[in-house]
Image (tube, helix red, strand yellow):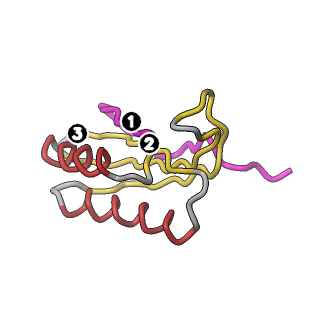
Amino acid sequence: MSFYENTLVTKQDLPKTEFNKIRDKYNELINNNSGKVIKIEEWGLLNLARKIKKYNKGFYIHFKFEGNKDTLQEINKKMKVDTSIIRYLTVKYKKLDIKNEYFTKEKR
């Protein structure tokens, strides 16, 4: 089993209920396909560097998980056909950093 980080960007005009459904859907998908979700980070609504499919902003969800090639194939297959997702990226790691969250709002 290898460690992965998967970041997906959803449409900016999604209601909170749809956003939660997407997060739960991919959480269950990873756990049901011989994977294990270690951490889920919701980065919120962020500006995009360039327009993607006429969107200037997007909601970001970041998964840190452990899985194998079957897990990745299933995730990629589902994300390609999901119309709520405008971009996604999966990166393989030897070791995950679960302590740091880079997009948390600091209280001042």
Measured along the vertical axis of the image, is residue 10 above or below residue 23? above
* Image: magenta residue range: 87-108
- Magenta-drawn stretch contains 5: no
- Residue at point 76%, 49% (across, down): 106
Residue, far right: 108
- Neighbour tally class for label 2: few under 14, some 14-19, many 20 plus, Cα within 10 Å: some
Question: Residue 17: x percent and y percent?
Answer: 52, 72
- Magenta-drawn stretch contains 91: yes
Mark pair 3, 2: CA separation: 16 Å
Circle 1 or circle 3, nearest the eye? 1
Residue on which the image places disc 2 = 7
Give the structural element (helix, strand or loop) at label 2.
strand
State left or right for residue 23 relative to residue 101: left
- Residue at point 44%, 39% (across, down): 87
Q: Are marks 1 and 2 in contact (CB under 8 Å)?
A: yes
Give the structural element (helix, strand or loop) at label 3.
strand
Question: Residue 6: x percent and y percent?
Answer: 38, 42
Q: Are marks 3 and 2 in contact (CB under 8 Å)?
A: no
How many labels sit on residues? 3
